[in-house]
Image (spheres, rainbow, N blue to C red):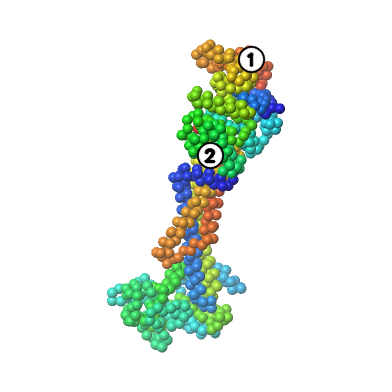
Amino acid sequence: MSLIELKEVSKLYGFGDATVVALDEINISVSKGEFVAVMGPSGSGKSTLMNLIGLLDRPTHGSFSLNDRSVERLRTNQRAKVRRDTIGFVFQSFNLLPKLTVLENVALPLVYKGITQTRRLKQAGAMLERVGLSDREQFYPKQLSGGQAQRVAIARALVNNPHIIIADEPTGNLDSQSSRLVMELLADIHKSGGTILMVTHNPELTRYATRVVFMHDGDIIGDEQSALGQVPKLLKKTMYSLSRFSLEDDLAGVSVLMKTFPDKIEKQKARKKIQPKKRATKKRTAKK
Amino acid sequence: MTFGNNMKEALFSLKTSRWRSMLTVLGIIIGVASVVTIVSIGEGVRKQVEGQINILGSDTITVRPGKSVTRNSEGKIIDVNLLASQSNGSFSNNDYEVISKSKNVLVSVPFSKISAVAKTDEREFLDGNVVATTSELPKVLKQKVLYGEFFDDKNPNKNIAILGKKVAQELFNENVPIGKSLQIREEQFIVGGIMDNYANNPLSPSTDYNRTIFIPYETGKKISGGQTQIYQVLVVPEAIGLTDEVAKNITINLQKAHGNQEDFTVLKKEDTLAVTNGILKLLTSLIAGLAGISLIVGGIGIMNIMLLSVTERTREIGVRKAVGATNRQILNQFLTEAAILSLAGGFLGIIVSLVVDYAIALFTDIVPAITFPIMGIALVLALAVGVFFGITPALKAASKDPIDALRYE
């Protein structure tokens, strides 16, 4: 029984010649309690995948079930409700509303659930206590440091008791000290049974994850279970190859991952050659 | 999301952009204030006229020269000719006698305008009328003589003048100039009495009795060379039930005297009410319609500011959607904001028009009447404007794609 089940899911943007394939027939299933780190170069479809799983977007093809419920054909308002009740988002840029206090920001998801203000603020207060920011309740987001803001954002994501936390580069804007605090918090949530999907560029952070998924050009090219505190083997190769990464490579736009999985990429290319028609419509997406 | 929440959110976001909100509301304030002021002036004038007509008593019949109304076969007024009611035509002394000698007429009071300027040694009185009439006028107009006495019928040729309240103040510079003299067409008149303040009718300034000098009918005839220019005759029948019959009699008799033509108007109390109400309703709705244009301009202001606000808050919309807001909840949020803007404009507009109306009542004869229905309609109207012009921006906000909205800088 998996919490998230994607089968042959594709996402295409644009029409005709300008069609961009952001996700190419992806299959992935995530069970309850997993901490999945998603890695890959810019434009590999990580964010698109997160948006799909977070019900912000709809797949072009394929089936997607959440909690054993098929959700790919849900209408906008139903998706909003499922999103409200099952998903918590943590963004790279925090996305706190600047005009609301920290407490009100945390309480925001409960507003759309129709919970009374007293109960909202009480629950939000409890969440802030969990992330260790009870003394910042009446502050405004701009009065917080980056790390504090992200912890508030995590509190907001948690306040609805979601089944899944989707974190899109949660430490992207933070220094290493704050990053560590935020990651400890996520690890804490994971330890208490939460399911977390996290996009990251930082290989070190995969130590917190139980599973690492590598993406490239809309495909999943690597999927490895890893013990907590360990950097997965595939990634170690990547890290060791760092020294071989030259300026020439950089100019050529070759990513670290492409070097790590030479055989896989070759295989992929070979596969695509067999289907020339399909390939004509596929281009690397410009989206991050 | 509950309505109360929407209200709070909307109030909060309006408060944070205070100047912008105030300027937007100003448009609605001007719109609502102008509509309410005009309608309340119309309503006030209507009430004044009605009050004046009611003072005349339910049995009084008004006869005027010129055919100002058209009636259907049942005698109901179907059309009002505004120009005829302001015409220069007048009744002759003969007409007056026809009216007064009609069957069942108890009293008939002529109002004969004399083209004259009254003056004393010090000043002239230009801003009013000289009216020649009979001794029954105070009774028929239900108007008291404040000081002195109205002239009686014992010596119909006496040169006595009864002054309206303002005439006394402006011509003699005192409240009770009884016994003093004034000149009308080289004739000396003695002031015999001062009328009580007359509740004015702003619609017809020609009958401002506070600015009128009343002289005896026969004297008036004498100084204008035997001619009369009767612009109105008020008739009281012998008994209340006889009103219809007397009106009919007068009509028939006058028609006979005028070569079978109905070139005059006989109005009962309810006719007079209907005529003035008709005229006022037309005028008020016409001007209120014009003022309503400013309300539409105010609505466009709201739409403009809401569109701007939606664009500015794109990211906020994205966040709200990401945490689970449905399109409908976003729509309601922005719609509530627009509605609050316009309702605030409505409230403040009513307050402004209350102030303006107070000023109008202070400085003119018009007493505007703001009634609760007028206020209610103004608020509903303002709300309707807000919702109508707020729906497009709100729809725009609701239909934003959350992914694009979250990426918006």
- Residue at the location (68% across, 33% down)? A71
Q: Chain of mark 2?
A: A
Q: Are marks 2 and 1 on the same chain?
A: yes
Is the residue A243 above or below the residue B272 in the image?
Answer: above
**What residue lies at 52% left-to-right and 83% top-to-bottom?**
B105
A126 or A225, nearer to the observer: A126
The total number of labels drawn is 2
Residue corresponding to mark 2: A104
Question: Which quarter of the picture shows residue A114?
Answer: top right
A236 to B333, vertically: above or below: above
- Indicate the amino acid at tag 2: Glu
Image quadrant occupied by the N terminus of chain B: top right
Residue A52 in sight in this render: no
Q: Residue at x 64, y 23 (%)?
A: A24
- Label 2: element kind: helix
**Residue B269, percent from left and from top:** 53, 74
In this view, the residue in front, A271 or B62, is A271
Horizontal and vertical percent for residue A138?
A: 49, 38
Which residue is identified by label 1? A264
